Image (cartoon, rainbow, N blue to C red):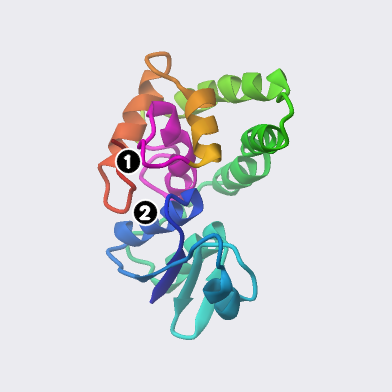
Amino acid sequence: MRLYRAEWSTNCERVTLALAHKGLEAEPVWIDYADRSAVERVSGQGLVPVLEHDGTVVADSQRILRYLDDAFPDAPLIPDDPWFDVFLEWFDGVWKGPPNAIEAAEEEGRTPDPAWSAQLREWLGRFERLLEGREYLLGPFSAADCVAYPFLKYGAGRDQADDELFHRILERELAFGNAHPRLAAWVRRVAERPGTYLLS
């Protein structure tokens, strides 16, 4: 099994968390953003992560999580919860919109719309409420935690070696400090699991 990945990639960390949860190992194939030829050769596109397993090639972090759960059903990641798919679609299709828009604006030298920052701060309350009375977002550790943690963790700080603009934006915009204690505790809890990129 091989995992095509890039340094500090949030989407790749989703997969490393899932692999570790299942007790699996994948040979890393490191991709330089300036040269994506290796991942393009294997998958026909240049984005990471890409998983290669027994002749099957799977791109996209959420698709990889589902593939791993089908191929290796022990220590399941996909819960029997009607809200699970809704959460995953909302996180990638809605939640990621504001930080992506802020990044695009800053890269183009424009002032980001303050409504984007306000929306992200408001949504922190949703995660805080989800964690009431539970250790993980939807109950037991699941793909929901794998999907959200690599992004939300920046609200608790950033490894100073990680200087990517998107991650600096997440650190600045999320910074939940003491205002969201359940969310902060969840970040610490997931950070202790194998497969995470440790925060400084």
- Per the image, is 142 magenta? yes
Location of residue 134 with respect to 21 vertically, above or below: above
Residue 12: where, in percent of width, then height?
46, 56
Quadrant placement of the N terminus: bottom left
Residue at the image position 25 percent from the left and 42 percent from the top: 192
Indicate which disc, 1 or 2, sits on the residue closer to the N terminus.
2
| Residue found at the far top of this picture | 179
Callout 2 environment at 10 Å: few (<14), some (14 to 19), or many (20+)? many
Q: Which residues are magenta?
A: 136-163
Viewer-closest of 123 and 172: 172
Q: Secondary structure at mark 2?
A: helix
Residue 97 pos. (x, y %): 67, 37
**134 within the magenta span:** no
Q: Report if the CB atoms under discs 1 and 2 are less than 8 Å apart.
A: yes
The residue drawn where x is 31% and y is 56% is: 21
The dot on residue 190 is 1
Badge number at residue 111: none
- Few, some or many residues within 10 Å of mark 1 (<14, 14–19, 20+): many
Q: Amino acid at mark 2?
A: Leu
Name which residue lies at 71% across and 31% down: 109
Is 129 positioned to the left or the right of 191 in the image? right
Vertically, is 62 above or below 190?
below
As measured in the structure, the alpha-carbon distance from the residue carrying label 1 to the one carrying label 2 is: 9 Å
In the figure, 178 relative to 63: above or below? above
The residue carrying mark 2 is: 17
Q: Secondary structure at mark 1?
A: helix
Q: Amino acid at mark 1?
A: Val
**Image quarter of residue 46:** bottom right
Please identify the quadrant where the C terminus is shown.
top left
